[in-house]
Image (spheres, coloured by chain):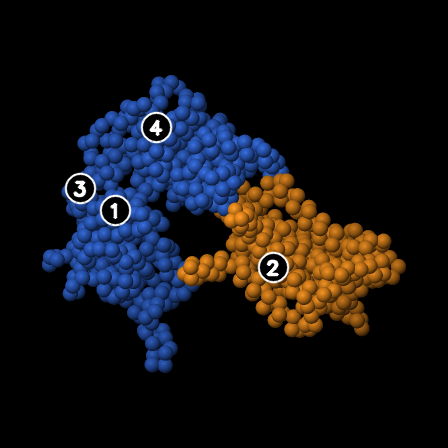
Chain colours: A blue, B orange
Amino acid sequence: MKETDMLTMRGIHKEFPGVKALSNVDFTLRKGEIHALMGENGAGKSTLIKVLTGVYPLDRGDIRVEGIEGAVINHSPEEAQKNGISTVYQEVNLCPNISVAENISLARQPLTKWGAVKWKKMNRTAEAALDAVGLKIDVTKTLGDYSVAIQQMVAIARAVDVQCKVLILDEPTSSLDDQEVKKLFEVMKSLKDQGVSIIFVTHFLEQVYEVCDAITVLRNGELVGRYDVAELPRVQLVAKMLGHEYDDLAQIRSQGGESLSGEIRETILDARDLSKAGSIKPFDLEIGKGEVIGLTGLLGSGRSELARLLFCADKPDRGELSFKGESVRAHNPIDSLKRGMAFLPEDRKEEGIIGDLSVRENLIIALQARTGMFKLLPLARQNELADKFIEILSIKTASAETPVSQLSGGNQQKVILGRWLITDPDFLILDEPTRGIDVGTKAEIQKLIVRLAREGMTIMFISSEIEEMLRTVDRLCVLCDRKKVGELKNENITQHNVMAAIAGGNQ
Amino acid sequence: MSDTLSLIKSKGRALVGQRLFLPLFALFLVLIVNVIKTPAFFNISIQNGVLYGYIIDIINRSSELVILAVGMTLVIATGGIDISVGAVSALSAAVCVRLLGSSYDNYATPMVLAILAALAIGMICGAFNGLLVSKLRIQAMVATLILFTAGRGVAQLISAREIGGKMVPGQIIYVRMESFKGIGGFLPKVIVPTPVFIAAAVVLIFYLVLTRTALGLYIKTVGINSRAGRLVGINSTFIMFLGYVLCGLTASMAGVISSSRIYSSDANNIGLNMELDAILAVALGGNSMAGGKFSLAGSVIGAITIQALTTSLYAMGVTADQLPVYKAVVVVLIVSIQSEELKRWISARGGKKA
């Protein structure tokens, strides 16, 4: 361990049943630096943090902290805190129903010898702690009365207050607006000046370049590298996160469908100035009939949020949406369904499968909802549809009556896909339909998309795998930091252009 | 020989694996104990032109609970709970009796209208609960606690009578007309008690509505994954709301039957502790308290089991004040044999021995 190092992690291994979450990862945090930890979903960021703070036991590896002799192995977050490592999570995990001061000194209140709380002393300590992060607020007020940003600062103040050397901020900016983010950065910089080293987990590129000194990139549980921010252009960073070399210009777009470029398509969907605060900034989007449109961007860039507004899974704050030439007024999924839209959500478990229901029931439920409660589809028709789609999509299930929760992830995804295909939609939104499923099924789904588009269905396809998009889409919308930043068409859709667009923020 | 044995084994396993096996087994156990202790338990005779016997008594007395359990099943299936059903029963009974009046010569309001009014009150109470839970997202236990406490109070206010020139609430008001007793007793020339018919009709109608429309499927969907339900176009809020309204309706039906049994409205005692028995009936029927898949038949069996237990304990000479203790012991046994954890523990131990 060098003089300038605050924390070193060497050869970190962590395995979960069936998954190598981290293999041979090295991580070095210097004194007084803000260090970004980056990577896409499943890269191993949070596992690394959790191994460090003792949430998960370490399988193999060596962790050393400045000022502590020998290897440091934390068995719990409390122990990590004693060793000078504090964490602030994305969701504020303080108690909103008690005062700010109480929160800061929770579980370590100053007590009199009779066991009563020394309120005045506690309040003064709290004020001092908040002062360190540059915050002057009434500490006797209830925490829940303050904005999320302030609550986050209080959480940081509490974390720093326990003689902290290493502060971990796990996606602290996700729920903050621009002003609040600025304020947070000031606090981070002032902490840095006081000699605290900060690990900053985020997926907003903008912010990394604004506040960080160094970047460590992880991918699929392995270390890609450690870089100084000044020496790593954005495009390179995106390439490293996604796992493709920048100059890998190989034209992968091929078979796909013969793109119908040049032809003027009939507009099926038109969004003007549509937005929802805190999820997606205003955007315009016009989609032609029979088009396959892709949405790309890093995690948290607003891909899913945009799609959700189109399906009315979320209600927009403002803007105009029209579908098949008619202005959309009723903003409920059932209305979208009746208009001929379908939406396969990103989170299969939370929003897709209805676990205890059978494969048959899961397949017909959307059609049933559109038909109406009082017109139950006859059982014969249900069985016919279920058998048909189990065959078309080659869903592997013991029978149509098997609970869907007993199927593998890929087959569950096929069931949800089948659920929407049964409704014979005009516009199908697929949000990460291939995540977490095997390669064979992925290829099947891609082929299906191309075939459906040829038959005249309009499809919106969202995926974090760029290659997959290149193979299937006619047009690609690029999103960055909750904003639609560009569109690529036909021959312009290349890995290079996509990465440049994601990284550049503007084309 | 070994073939036959394995066939019996596999058949046996299939039987045990059936959803309703355990609830039926529990009911069977209660009845078996009765036959041993009281040999005359299954005797049925006709006295005074009506059926008479322990079994008849159990089926008759369990009617209210069966009806309540049907409504409770729906609410629990959507992931909620309704602890106000007992109080709503009392309130509906009070409204019904108040409208009928205490005259010996005629009803103040035609009986049909009075009953309809009582049912309407039950549905309004259910709608109130449903609004709080589905729209305002208040926890079901808290939301229904409001009517649990207030419902009986309102029932007492409705059951006010003039005593010494002042209106005193909480009086027992009697209905003097004979025809009102038919609801909780016997109809002329019919040997089966009327509540049994009502309970059977309620179960049948709910069963048909749940299986012939998509309502049953919707309720299960909302209970299992309401967010997924919303995205496939199911109005989760409305389905939850509807569950509470139907539960209120069944509570008022039970209330009217109870008041007819004693041809009066007793705001303090009608439906007392019935909410707990109704929830227990649903649980004994093998339904998950977390919502989702449900079995109406299971709840009905559960309700009959509870009444069988009560009646048989009385038959064995247990006094009313000690009844809950014995009941508790038996309930603990019944829910234990249904516990997955216990099954796992036993099979793990069995595995070790082998």
Mark 4 on the same chain as mark 2: no
The label nearer to you, 2 versus 1, is 2
The residue lying furthest to the right in this view is B105
Q: Is residue B194 visible?
A: yes
Mark 3 on the same chain as mark 1: yes
Query: Which of the image's four quarters has the N terminus of chain A?
Result: bottom left
Amino acid of disc 3: Leu
State how far apart marks 2 and 3 are (Cα). Answer: 71 Å
Return the x and y of residue B322 as percentages of the image width and height. 65, 73
Q: Is residue A77 above or below residue B241?
A: below
Amino acid of disc 2: Ala
Callout 3 crowding tier (Cα within 10 Å): few <14, some 14–19, many ≥20? some
Question: Upstream in the sequence, badge 3 or badge 4?
Answer: 3
- Which residue is identified by label 4? A472
Question: Upstream in the sequence, badge 3 or badge 1?
Answer: 1
Return the x and y of residue B93 as percentages of the image width and height. 73, 59
Residue at 72 percent of width and 63 percent of height = B41
Mark 4 on the same chain as mark 1: yes
- Which residue is identified by label 3? A232
- Which residue is identified by label 2? B26
Q: Please report contact status of discs 4 and 1: CB closer than 8 Å, yes or no.
A: no
The numbered dot on residue A281 is: none
State how far apart marks 2 and 1 are (Cα). Answer: 53 Å
- The part of the image, by quadrant, that contains residue B286 is bottom right
Q: In the depicted view, which residue is nearer to us: A113 or B80? A: B80
Return the x and y of residue B194 as percentages of the image width and height. 77, 54
